[in-house]
Image (cartoon, helix red, strand yellow):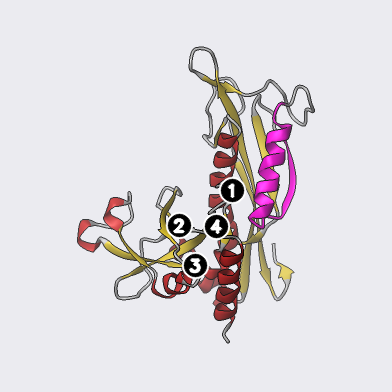
Amino acid sequence: MSEKDKKLDQIIKTIDANDIKFLKLQFSDIHGLPKSMAVPLKKADDVEDIVNDGLLFDGSSVAGLASINDSDLLAKPDVDTFSTIPWRPESKGTSRFICDIFTTEGKPYDGDPRGVLKKSLQLAEKRGYQFNMGPEPEFFIIKEDENGNYIPADEAEYFDVEPLDQGTDIRREIVLGLEKLDFDVEVSHHEVAAGQHEVDFKYADALKTADAVITFKEAVKALVNNLGFKATFMPKPFLGLNGSGMHCNQSLFKDGKNIF
């Protein structure tokens, strides 16, 4: 049995054990926004056909992905990206794959941002390099005031604690949710501006990190929304307050040594 078949067999067992009824096939558009299609699963074994055959979709309707003349594209799941989705209902739950995009002839599609990164990393690997990334994404947790305007959800500052920091329980739920998605969370804390937060996770190779950042933003927005607030990754949502950024710590390894 190949390594892919072993992983697929474990995935099928996980889907069956957790009564998963929907499978999301996810990819990113050129703006880095997640897009997905949900496939109902009548039985756990259905996932094998989806993984092997992929799913056709209209790429021309996704901004920046394909022209009307090349609209038919194929989303094929990457078995290494399987996970259950912690912010969806546990009963009749949902799992997801991140997909690579192919043409109907089975060739990697040039307009797939994930595919472009994979090509670059393959070129680096041929030259003996491994490229790692460690991101530090910042975001605001916001709420509506009595006039319907969005404002920071607290007035705390850098590293503040309760009661000034009203985001302690929210960050806790975010961390627990991310750990269910197999994130190795290193630290979480309040940032400099009111309502601003940071959750850092361990570095990995650039492809895994890119997938993780897209998943991270989706997870944070969904988990915070479930708690009655909103999360925004806008770089400058409030006049007069610090903006949000995402430091990206980079390292390049060759023969097991960091060459920077």
Name the kind of residue labelled 4 in the image. Answer: Asp
Instruction: Tell me if mark 2 has few (under 14), some (14-19) or many (20+) residues whose alpha carbon lies within 10 angstroms of its own.
Output: some
Spatial distance from mark 2 to mark 3, Cα to Cα? Answer: 17 Å
Q: Secondary structure at mark 1?
A: helix
User: Answer yes or no: do the residues labelled 4 and 3 have beta carbons within 8 Å?
Assistant: no
Could you tell which of marks 2 and 3 lies nearer the N-terminus? 2
Q: Which of the two marks, 4 or 3, is nearer to us in this view?
A: 4
Instruction: Name the mark on residue 216.
Output: 1
Residue 170 located within the stretch drawn in magenta? yes
Q: Which residue is mark 2?
A: 26
Q: Give whichever of 111, 49 is nearer the camera.
A: 49
Q: Which mark is residue 118?
A: 3
Q: Residue at 67% across / 39% down in the picture?
A: 198
Residue 3 visible here:
yes
Q: Which residue is mark 4?
A: 211
Residue 193 counted in the magenta span: no
Disc 3 residue crowd, few under 14, some 14–19, many 20+, Cα 10 Å: some
Specify few, some or many for label 4: CA neighbours under 10 Å numbering under 14, 14-19, or 20 or more: some
- Circles 3 and 1: CB distance less than 8 Å? no
Q: Residue at (52%, 73%) from the top-left corner?
A: 122
Residue in front for this viewpoint, 109 or 121: 109
The part of the chain drawn in magenta is: 166-190
Task: Give the Cα distance between marks 4 and 3.
Answer: 12 Å
Crowd band around label 1 with a 10 angstrom C-alpha radius: few (<14), some (14–19), many (20+):
many
Q: Amino acid at mark 3?
A: Lys
